[in-house]
Image (spheres, rainbow, N blue to C red):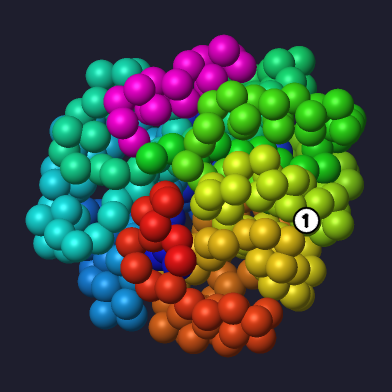
Amino acid sequence: MRGLIEFTNYCKNDCNYCGIRRSNKNADRYRLTEDQIIECCQVGFDLGYRTFVIQGGEDSTYKDDDLVRLIQRIKSEFPECALTLSIGEKPYESYQKYYDAGADRYLLRHETNTKELYEELHPDMSYEERIKCLKDLKEIGFQVGAGFMVGLPNQTNEDFVNDLMFLKELQPHMVGIGPFIPHQDTPMKDAGTGDLETTCKLLSIVRLLLPKVLLPATTALGSISPLGREQGLKAGANVVMPNLSPTNVRDKYLLYDGKICTGDEAAHCRGCIERRINNAGYSVDMSRGDWGQTP
Ligand code: SAH
């Protein structure tokens, strides 16, 4: 289990699928202060979490010095916890600073390994830069999470094969796979939603391809079907990331329509997810959950 803190929904990028893209004037923007983020960690710590994932849009208000201070503070106040960042593309030197400050892991989905599709989806971004970031993160020594969306418009099995071959080569520690879900205020609002069966099949293939990999049953999977995360676990997923964000900002971090758990307290999510994991036939492991350590 990892506790997820969505600390800002400001973003300088304009990804066509994402509800917090910079062009979405309807997004109600927020950013948490350092003290608020620490407070979320404390709530999570008291609920038993030993990994925190700090995720956000690419918000340039947080300078490297601010992030380094935040990382050092989390690591000094919660020394037994692992810290994961998911804050997008940065220069090598910035990633190095975060690592030196104590961050352990970094999630940056490659989104799709088909260059043409990648560039259609991401105005002003480059496929090569995304891949370079993942390689930089690995070289620096982070435990790295890549991953992709399922059910993007015009995505074919050939694209999935590209994703799988890329993952085999990169050998990431984690792979985040979730269905694409349209958001009403994006250019992709009329596109179809990714389906549960294809997503679960891909989870299973990745489990076979990278036997020890950390594989989340994602919130997006739980959002397209009431038992989506349970099905993901049965297909081979072994990580769940319940939300620790304060309830007053939860419904603002909307990457897609119909996101689950936007009104729930952290303690409620902690109990709900444990029941779901147990009902799927598994038990909860609240350790740091480093790669290779999963029981
Ligand atoms: N800014 C960070 C965090 C992105 S949000 C970064 O660039 O890594 C985390 C993930 O949500 C994205 O990597 C993307 O795969 C997923 N996501 C965004 N919009 C989505 C949508 N409409 N449907 C499903 N998943 C989406």
Residue 131 part of the magenta segment? yes
Give the residues drawn in magenta, as a range: 126-142
Q: What is the secondary structure assignment of the residue under circle 1?
A: helix
**Amino acid type, mark 1:** Cys
Q: Quadrant of residue 92?
A: top left
The relative height of residue 151 versus residue 166 in the rendered view (above or below) is below
Question: In the rendered picture of this protein, how many numbered marks are placed on residues?
Answer: 1
**Looking at the image, which is closer to me, 247 or 209?**
209
Q: Quadrant of residue 24?
A: top right
Q: Position of residue 164 (x, y in %)?
A: 71, 32
**Magenta stretch prevailing secondary structure:** helix
Q: Position of residue 135 (x, y in %)?
A: 45, 21
Residue that appears at 59% across and 84% down: 278
**Looking at the image, which is closer to me, 173 or 85?**
173
Q: Position of residue 9 (x, y in %)?
A: 47, 47
**Looking at the image, which is closer to me, 249 or 157?**
157
Residue 35 part of the magenta segment? no
- Residue 139 as seen in the image, left or right of residue 166: left
Residue that appears at 38% across and 72% down: 286
Q: Position of residue 280 (x, y in %)?
A: 68, 80
Asked whether residue 124 appears in the rendered view, the answer is no
- Residue 277 as seen in the image, left or right of residue 119: left
Disc 1 residue crowd, few under 14, some 14–19, many 20+, Cα 10 Å: many
The relative height of residue 54 versus residue 48 in the rendered view (above or below) is above
Q: Label 1 belongs to which residue?
A: 200
Quadrant that contains the N terminus: bottom left
